[in-house]
């Protein structure tokens, strides 16, 4: 399973490799490239292809792509014949450090991101940092937002490493890139294996995502990339932390400076806070009429708190 871009770029090499190792390869399932195609229509198309080619319970679904493909593929593997084997080959930085790890899968609803899905663990994840050389700079930097996020909630040494090596990482220098990916993957696995179904600890990985997902949904998944939305969302969460006297302004300023160095957005021209607030009621951390945000006491010490609209609106000043 892949998309219209990668079927030309990486699929031929993968197919040859599988054939050389004596594996039977069916025709690729190819969906359009982009977040807005992570939906039930694409999922239905893939079910049709699996039935058409007589895939059975012994079949193995291989995903080749970024977060859209891994999320969609996970949902497909989990539900086709009530579960078939799954292998992820993530081709973006975001997928390598985040989307492919932990078993979250699903699709978007037009009104809210990732509201239809399940947890389904892959049998194997193959991470090859060399494929990142084919990414555009915008999509590469998009993935750095997730690295920064996991550093903030769970890996203080990684955050310091990012501060010290950010320009080499931006240039995709092999040694710091490999170390960064390894650290981020290790930290995420440490959390997701302890809380697979996001009952407690894993919720902290949503730092910046309550706001970020709402921003993506408001734009119908067209105007902003996931990491760019999370970049803005982290700043709102850190401003809330300061306003509520939970976190420190020095942390906010350090993160803001790092995001600016990376080239991720830290400001936005138009912001409909009321519309975003309504969308956030569908966020996975919301419940009982309350909207919860992951805040930060300090780097490595997240905290989840219920937020009122006036607090959220006031915190959004950080983006103006």
Image (cartoon, rainbow, N blue to C red):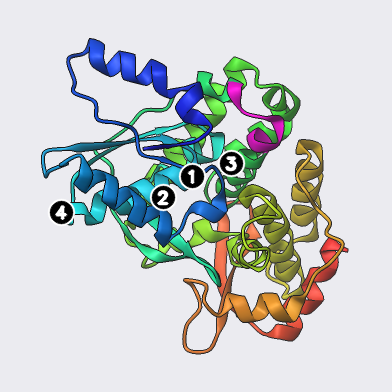
What is the magenta range?
134-141
Numbered tag placed on residue 71 in the rendering? 2
Quick one: label 1 or label 4, which is nearer the N terminus?
Answer: 1
Q: Seen in the image, is 8 located left or right of residue 79?
A: right
Q: Which residue is mark 4?
A: 81
Frontmost of labels 1 and 3 is: 1
Secondary structure found at label 3: helix
At a point 81% along the width and 77% down the height, the residue shown is 314
The secondary structure type at the circle numbered 1 is helix
SS category of the residue bearing label 4: helix
Counting residues from the start of the chain, the first of labels 4 and 3 encountered is 4
Query: Which residue lies under the disc numbered 3?
Result: 147
Of the residues under marks 2 and 4, which one precedes in the sequence? 2
Check disc 2: other Cα within 10 Å, few if <14, some if 14-19, many if 20+: many
- The residue that mark 1 highlights is 67
- Mark 1, Cα crowd under 10 Å, few <14 / some 14-19 / many 20+, is many
Instruction: Name the N-terminal-most of marks 1 and 3.
Output: 1
Q: Are marks 4 and 3 in contact (CB under 8 Å)?
A: no
Are the two marked residues, 2 and 1, in contact with CB atoms closer than 8 angstroms? yes
| Residue closest to the far front | 52
Residue furthest to the top: 20
Q: Main structural element of the magenta stretch: helix, strand or loop?
A: helix
- Residue 190's disc is none
As drawn, which residue projects farthest toward the bottom? Answer: 289
Look at the picture and state if 283 lies above or below 156: below
Residue positioned 64% across, 48% down in the render: 227
User: Residues under labels 1 and 4: Cα distance?
Assistant: 23 Å
- Are discs 1 and 3 less than 8 Å apart at CB? no
Q: Residue 298's x, y, as percent?
A: 65, 57
């Amino acid at each position: 399973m892949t998309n219209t871009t990668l079927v030309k770029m990486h699929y031929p090499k993968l197919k040859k490799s599988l054939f050389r190792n004596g594996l039977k390869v069916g025709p690729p399932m190819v969906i359009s490239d982009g977040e807005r195609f992570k939906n039930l229509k694409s999922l239905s198309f893939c079910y049709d292809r699996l039935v058409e080619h007589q895939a059975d319970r012994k079949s193995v679904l291989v995903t080749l792509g970024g977060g859209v493909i891994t999320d969609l593929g996970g949902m497909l593997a989990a539900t086709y014949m009530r579960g078939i084997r799954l292998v992820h080959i993530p081709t973006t930085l975001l997928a390598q450090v985040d989307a492919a790890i932990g078993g979250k899968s699903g699709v978007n609803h037009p009104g809210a991101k990732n509201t239809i899905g399940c947890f389904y663990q892959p049998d194997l994840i193959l991470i090859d940092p060399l494929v990142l050389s084919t990414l555009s700079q915008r999509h590469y930097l998009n993935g750095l937002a997730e690295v920064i996020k996991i550093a903030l909630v769970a890996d203080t040494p990684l955050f310091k490493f990012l501060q010290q090596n950010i320009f080499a990482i931006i240039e995709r220098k092999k040694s710091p890139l490999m170390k960064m990916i390894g650290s981020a993957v290790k930290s995420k696995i440490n959390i997701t294996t302890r809380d697979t179904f996001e009952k407690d600890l894993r919720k902290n990985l949503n730092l910046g995502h309550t706001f970020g997902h709402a921003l993506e949904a408001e734009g119908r998944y067209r105007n902003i990339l996931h990491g760019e939305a999370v970049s803005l969302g982290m700043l709102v969460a850190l401003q809330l932390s300061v306003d509520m006297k939970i976190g420190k302004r020095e942390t906010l300023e350090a993160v803001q400076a790092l995001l600016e160095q990376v080239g991720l957005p830290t400001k936005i021209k138009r912001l409909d806070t009321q519309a975003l607030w309504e969308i956030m009621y569908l966020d996975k951390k919301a419940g009982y009429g309350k909207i919860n945000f992951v805040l930060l006491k300090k780097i490595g010490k997240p905290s989840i708190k219920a937020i009122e609209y006036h607090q959220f609106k006031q915190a959004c000043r950080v983006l103006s």
